[in-house]
Every structure is written in structure tokens, then in C-alpha cells.
Amino acid sequence: MGEEGRRGFFNLSLCRLRPCPAPLRGSVLHKMVGFFLINSLQIEHVKGDLFSCPAKNSLAHCISEDCRMSAGIAAVFKNKFGSVQELLDQGKKSGEVAVLKRDDRYIYYLITKKKYFHKPTYKSLRSSLEAMKTHCLDNGVTDVSMPRIGCGLDRLEWNEVSLMLEEVFEDTDIKITVYTL
């Protein structure tokens, strides 16, 4: 029987391998294969300055509803792109995304908390990422560069955020590049 006729056939060259999550360790599936198969997803990790990414890449980072952007990488975005009033006029709430268009790319402001001194939740970050994904798909965005979103001053755990990025963008052709200094 040909490959196309076998049930359960996987082309491993098209999949990413990830360790089996703790709840399934010791299960029959874990004993059989020891890993999960994940759809192809392009997340690249780069050591360097986020703003050195290709000019065609859209950019993303997290902010609060009040658009204060007074510390961390948000302050750099504020100085570089300005337009705080334009962002405020969009009236976006926590779990949504505000967007600026600059040249041939979009700048995504993931709204993950109400006030600048609050901390985000994983739920608000996921909702903001889903909103960004929708905007990307609707506008033909194929490359997004970002820092380790939510993990600097906002104190979310990168392992959780990284898995969330994989889950949100796994069924798309959007390449995510994560920059760290």
C-alpha cells in the first residue's frame, strides 16, 4: 500500500517535534513515540536588536490601554513611532490590538492590561495575539518581529508565552522572529 493509503501517515519533514507534555507522560502514546508532532511553524530566535530586523517585517510588542509606554521596550517604540494619540483614538481594550501603518509594515501594539502599572494575564495576551493574527491574515502580513513579549517588565514566563505563540500561529504561514539582546 502506498504512503497516501496508510492511516496515520506523517511526513516528519513537515512537522516539528516537541517533548510530550507532562499530563501524557507514561501514557500509551508517550511509550509509543515519546514526542508530539506539531504542524510546521516558523518561529526563529535571533540575538540582536529588534529594530535591525528587515524593513518588510511588521513589529509587535505589549502595552496598556492607557498607552503610557514609559519604560522598557515600549518606551523605545513610543520614541521611534510616536502617534500615541492615534493609538488612543483606536479605543482598543485589553485583549485587543492597536495598529499603526508605517511605510510597508504594520506596528502591532498588543493591549494586554488596563493601566501601565498593572500586569497582564496569559488570557489577555492570547486574545491580543489572536487579534494580531486576524489582522495579519486579513492584510497579507507574513513576517512579524517581536521581543520576548510580556516577559520583561510584565513578568510572564517565556516558556508559556512561547508555547502560546506556537498555538496561536501554528496553522498560518506567518513567520515569527523573536529578538533578545
Image (cartoon, rainbow, N blue to C red):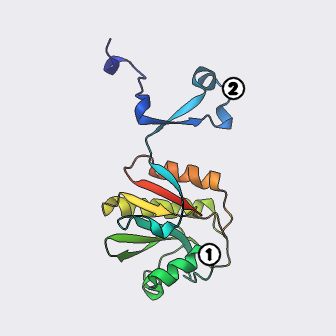
**Residue placed most toward the observer, 44 or 162:** 44
Sequence-first tag of 1 and 2: 2
Vertical comparison of 41 with 142: above or below: above
Residue occupying the point 67% across, 57% down: 157
Quarter of the view holding residue 5 = top left
Mark 2 Cα-neighbour bin, 10 Å: few <14, some 14–19, many ≥20? few
Mark 1 or mark 2: which is in front?
1
**Residue position for label 1:** 72
User: Is 98 left or right of 152, judged from the image as shown?
Assistant: left
Q: List x then y, in percent, for residue 109.
A: 48, 72
What's the mark number on residue 105?
none
User: Which kind of residue does numbered mark 1 sit on?
Assistant: Gly
Disc 2 target residue: 26
Front-most of residues 180 and 126:
180
Quarter of image, res 62: bottom right
Can I make out residue 173 in this image?
yes
